[in-house]
Amino acid sequence: MTTDDNAMGLGTSQIETVTGSENRKSAHLETPLIVALPVTSQTEQHTLGQSLRRYIKNKISIASPLRPSRVIVRPYGPGEKPRLLANNKIDKRPYLRYIESTRTLEVLCIPGKDLVKHYALLIATYYGLDQSEDKRLTQYSLPRKHQCYRWLHASNLRELGPVETVVLYNVERLGRPSSNPLKFDSKIDDPTRELFDWQIHRPTNTGIGSRKGPVAILDCNFKFWGDIAASLVEVLHDLCEVRQVLYIGKAGSLRDDDEPNTIIATGNDSWIDGAQIIWNNILQHAEDLSPKIQTGSNASVYSPLEETHEWLFTWCERCHWVDCEVGNLALACIKFEISFGYLNIISDNVAKGHEHDLTNEQLEIVKEKRQELLTVIESVLNHHLGLPPDDKKDGNGMP
């Protein structure tokens, strides 16, 4: 059964409660449980400062009349599927299941290692910050090796077919014309496998990029995070023979003077797991097209929760931007000899803080500023790929 619990957070209003004959122990823990510890117990130790509590509660508030004695964060197991919304789209938020006999709350996620760890640390830090809360054991079980790859490989990407270039959007495309939405002609009966929407474009001969094959503009219908990016590149390589990946996302700035939502970041290197990787940025020309685009060095983290003042002190002299995807994408593209470039909207200032940060991205003024940057990004993509203007494309994105 389900119980309404709007305070539960995780962006969802229902929890599946397993009782009576359905009662059972937690299932599908195919990797060892790891105890999640708070990243900090004091907001002043984190670069978000007083916004840290709001950031965590926006993502996952564990205040609940169920009062679990422990929380387990894990990926979906065999036979388990994401929840569907009323419009038959996949719910990007974790699925909550309460096991009454053991007073265990399960938080079920897309099978990404970084995503599972991110939610586990959100919960642990929530308890660590709130001294009035009874402390609960928070644990997590990571996905098995290749679990994310198999999940993506079984999705509707199998219907995309060969494309030379993929433009991957991981930021809300505000103001997308309703007459020209991303869509596809699905032959899949199971909507939980419809993980992507896309348009296919045929470049003109005016683009400066060397590749002239089909371009897929790809949107994810699930929580795209961290190392999921590397698995997606591998699947695109195996299923679609992709030779070029362009990524559009968000990042934080490690520079004091950068105002959020006024700058677009790019670059040709990233630090991930303590090592620097360097590639040929195929969007290196973008900085010449707009003063809003700036080049710098990227740091890859598994979660914004990593960004404490101690972390900032370590990385501020070495890197300009921080996000969770660029390093993973670059590593996978290097492995499979795929060209790569990225354009990240600077959404917050990690070094100095700003009134606009990760906690108030839905403000109208923030949306307006991001729309301006998205317009610049689309101009860069058109310049690089030689895509025709929107008014010369039909509903499928074809000229």
Image: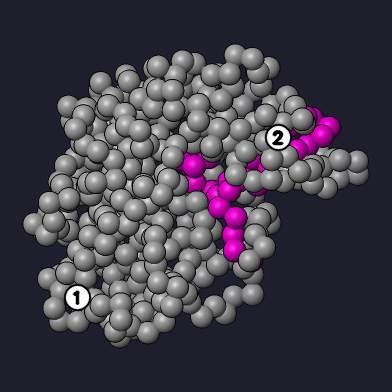
Residue 199: x and y in percent read: 39, 75
Query: Of callouts 2 and 1, which one flags the residue occurring earlier in the amino acid sequence?
Result: 2
Give amino acid for label 2: Leu
Location of the C terminus by quadrant is: bottom left
Residue 76: x and y in percent read: 62, 49
Residue 394: x and y in percent read: 37, 84
Q: Is residue 9 left or right of residue 56?
A: right
Viewer-closest of 42 and 95: 42
Query: Please, what secondary structure does the residue beneath circle 2 have?
Result: strand
The residue carrying pointer 2 sits among few (fewer than 14), some (14 to 19) or many (20 or more) residues within 10 Å by Cα, namely many
The residue that appears at 48% across and 66% down in the rendered structure is 196
User: Residue 386: which numbered mark, if any?
Assistant: 1
Kindly tell me whether residue 103 is visible in this rendering.
yes
Q: How is the image coloured?
A: one colour
User: Residue 105: which numbered mark, if any?
Assistant: 2
User: What span is colored magenta in the figure?
Assistant: 88-116
Q: Magenta segment: does it hold 103?
A: yes
Q: How much space separates mark 2 and mark 1, taking CA atoms?
A: 50 Å
The residue that appears at 41% across and 38% down in the rendered structure is 358
> Of all residues shown, which one is farthest toward the right?
21
User: Residue 342: which numbered mark, if any?
Assistant: none
The residue that appears at 32% across and 32% down in the rendered structure is 354
Q: Is residue 207 left or right of residue 41?
A: left
Viewer-closest of 225 and 240: 225
Q: In this view, does 25 lie to the left or right of 95?
A: right
